[in-house]
Image: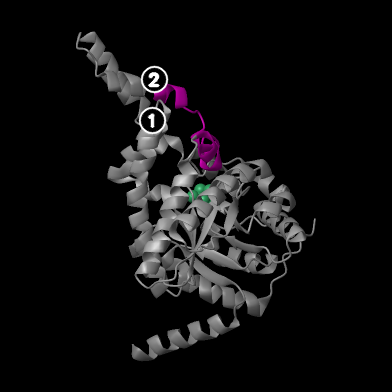
Amino acid sequence: VSDLVHSVHRLMRIADSTRRLKVRANADTPGDAERAVKMGAEGIGLVRTEHMFLGDRRVLVENLVLAANAKQRKKALKALMEPQRDDFIGIMEAMGDLPMTIRLLDPPLHEFLPDITELSVKVARAEESGEDSDSRDRMVLGAVRRLHEQNPMLGLRGVRLGLTIPGLFGTQTRAILEAVLEVRKRGGDPKVEIMIPLVSSIRELWEIKAEIEGVIKDVCEESGESIDAPIGTMIELPRAALRADEIAEDADFFSFGTNDLTQTTWGFSRDDVEGGFFFTYKDRGILTHSPFETLDQYGVGELVRIGAERGRRTKPDLKLGVCGEHGGDPDSIHFFHWVGLDYVSCSPFRVPVARLEAGRAKLLEKDFTPHH
Ligand code: PEP
Ligand code: MG
């Protein structure tokens, strides 16, 4: 066994000294971050902050989204601060001086709002029985009806939420920066990057960036410290890839979100991908595997290539990564190497495989030039 362990370590060392691509991990908790570091991740490519609000904390996002006036919104935003700051501190401590990309809130609303059918039944029953239905239930139902979407994955998510709820992204930024200051006090030196999700237009970026930069300036003035926090964007919608030259003017880095990019390029729902018609496609040989598993180089991959090329046309040294599921897929890693990304980011458990494959990608230099 010790021979085997020795050989594996040797192989990893060779892969690490060969590869050009860096390997980061997606991590949302201090535990994930520790695992990532143990697996050899060179940073975190994606902290999904919406995952910090699952379970008991779901109500915090619910209260924010349902806030009926500025006063309620302010209260709800304040309640979001502390739990986030504490989580960020834990992740930063686990990462030491490795970079971490924290993505601002990107929840599909249906995951955070109360179920509309259940709530309707509850309110209707209360009214029928002549009980005075809890006015909160009735009020919440009204708001949930207003916010209900037929296609939540194409709805009020990511940057759209940030623009709709003033102060949301600013509050998250403050939680990040206060965590940085706290970890510095404890002797650490965290490196944070702030990432905006679901951007498709430079104008979205302008507005959110102004909000984030305002908060950075305030926190630096208040604390008397300087904090360098690059601000970048996900490229996960076809329009963002196509307009990458323009978007790059205001982004310090890009991270390709190939999950949403696959969904929106193919028009396949990522949540229903194992559903009925997909089997028909496999049976008929129209598709041999899910494009959510291995990057489709002539469609989604082509958009990644276009996004990378156009982004770097504007900024030749623009940092580029990928944080969708494909970041840990061996075949897709060869493609990302060829496209010239700086890093892939995948789940902590896939980091060793990604390191090996990135090494093989450098040795093999596969050519993905499209031949039509
Ligand atoms: C993506 O869309 O590829 C991505 C990384 O973001 P999420 O999976 O959280 O939508
Ligand atoms: Mg996404």
Q: Splitting the image into 4 quarters, where does residue 21 fall?
A: bottom right
Q: Give the x, y percent position of residue 53.
A: 36, 46
**Would residue 198 be seen by someone viewing this image from the given angle?**
no
Disc tally is 2
Residue 142: numbered disc: 2
**Disc 2 residue crowd, few under 14, some 14–19, many 20+, Cα 10 Å:** some
Please tell me which residue is depicted at 59% across the width and 48% down the height of the picture.
Answer: 209
**Can residue 151 be found in the magenta stretch?**
yes
Distance of label 1 from label 2 (alpha carbons): 19 Å
In the shown orientation, is residue 137 left or right of residue 207? Answer: left
Between residue 319 and residue 219, name the one nearer to us: 219
Please tell me which residue is depicted at 28% across the width and 14% down the height of the picture.
Answer: 124
**Can residue 41 be found in the magenta stretch?**
no
The disc labelled 1 sits on which kind of residue?
Answer: Lys
In this rendering, the answer to whether 211 lies above or below 113 is: below
Between residue 358 and residue 37, name the one nearer to us: 37
Between residue 204 and residue 371, name the one nearer to us: 204
Q: Does the residue labelled 2 lie within 8 Å of ligand 1?
A: no
The disc labelled 2 sits on which kind of residue?
Answer: Gly
The residue sitting at the right extreme is 372
Dot 1: element: helix
Instruction: Looking at the image, tell me whether mark 1 or mark 2 is earlier in sequence order.
Output: 1
Please tell me which residue is depicted at 46% across the width and 41% down the height of the picture.
Answer: 168
Please tell me which residue is depicted at 49% across the width and 45% down the height of the picture.
Answer: 169
Q: Does the residue labelled 1 lie within 8 Å of ligand 1?
A: no
Span of residues in magenta: 143-164
Dot 2: element: helix
In the shown orientation, is residue 213 left or right of residue 250? Answer: left
In this rendering, the answer to whether 155 lies above or below 51 is: above
- The residue where tag 1 is placed is 71
The residue sitting at the bottom extreme is 3
